[in-house]
Each structure stands twice: as structure tokens, then as C-alpha cells.
Image: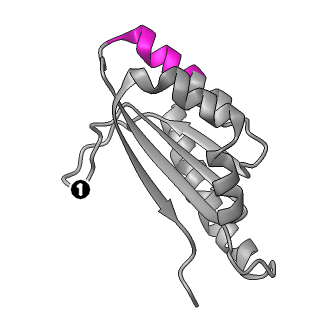
Amino acid sequence: MNTVLIFTLLFALAVPALAQQSSGSGNEDGFFVHTVYFWLNNPDSEADHEKLHEGLKEIAKIDLIKDAYVGVPADTDREVIDSSYDFSITFIFDDLESEQAYQTHPTHLDFVENYSDLWKKVVVYDAVPPAE
């Protein structure tokens, strides 16, 4: 099965399950979803793709992350789809505090220092459950 399809299915299944878990967990903050899209300086460079992929897999191992997904654009074509990026990550944390600790985690800081020369653009989308 295609890796992108697996990523999409897992994400589609994980977010509703986490929402149900968070509503009954007693955690006032619920969960925190951190999604980042990366555009490479040299999108045609296989070496740059491989290097960034390795770096993303390393930060995905940080123990503060509850669930981690590293993806590339799916082979889909609809007017509303932006597939101009080269890589994406979706990290799910227990709460905002865990995500904030991730931002200053040594592995994350090393990633930014050692890989930021590979990308020309990064866009971040952070999300939390809506207030009930």
C-alpha cells in the first residue's frame, strides 16, 4: 500500500480517536496538533529530499510527541488541494505545554540548526480541540 495513503488513513483515524480520548481524560487543554509544511530550496535534489527525510524521522522520535507522521504530497488533484510542498509533519502532543517543551528540546534545536539550509519556506498550523 502507498505510504502516503497509509499516512492519510492513520491521520484520519487518529485525530477523531484523540478527540474522544481528550474529552473524557480530565485534561483541560485536550490535545495539541502541530503540522508543518516544508518547501525545499532544491526540490529536484534527491540528496536534499533524503537528508530532510532523515532529519524529520529523527525529530519524530522525541518522547514528548504522542503520535508522529512524516508525509509527502499525495497524488491527488482537486482545486482545493495544495501539493506544492515537499514534506509535511504532523505531531500530536498531550497538551500545549508538551508542544512548547518540544520547541526547546535539544533534538529539535539541532534539527533546525542542521537542516534549515535545505528549505526556503516553512508553514506551521497548530490546532487544538474547539471549546465545547
Residue at figure coordinates x 65%, y 65% from the top left = 96
Relative placement, left or right, of 60 versus 75 is right
Give percent across and percent down for residue 68. Answer: 65, 44
Furthest-bottom residue in view? 132
Q: In which quarter of the image is the N terminus?
A: top right
Relative placement, left or right, of 3 versus 94 is left
The amino acid pointed to by label 1 is Val
Q: Name the residue under label 1.
A: 80
Give percent across and percent down for residue 130. Answer: 53, 81
In the depicted structure, whether residue 33 falls above or below residue 102: below
State the image quarter where residue 92 is shown: bottom right
Residue at figure coordinates x 61%, y 49% from the top left = 91
What residue span does the magenta drawing correspond to?
45-54
State the image quarter where residue 17 is shown: bottom right
The stretch drawn in magenta includes residue 46: yes
Give percent across and percent down for residue 102. Answer: 67, 47
Relative placement, left or right, of 74 versus 62 is left
In the depicted structure, whether residue 118 falls above or below residue 20: above
Relative placement, left or right, of 87 versus 68 is left
In the depicted structure, whether residue 51 falls above or below residue 88: above
Q: Considering depth in this image, is 124 or 7 the residue closer to the camera?
A: 124
Q: Quadrant of the C terminus?
A: bottom right
Q: Considering depth in this image, is 1 or 93 the residue closer to the camera?
A: 93
Label 1, secondary structure: give it.
Answer: loop
Magenta region, main secondary structure: helix
Residue at figure coordinates x 70%, y 62% from the top left = 97
The stretch drawn in magenta includes residue 86: no
Give percent across and percent down for residue 21. Answer: 75, 72
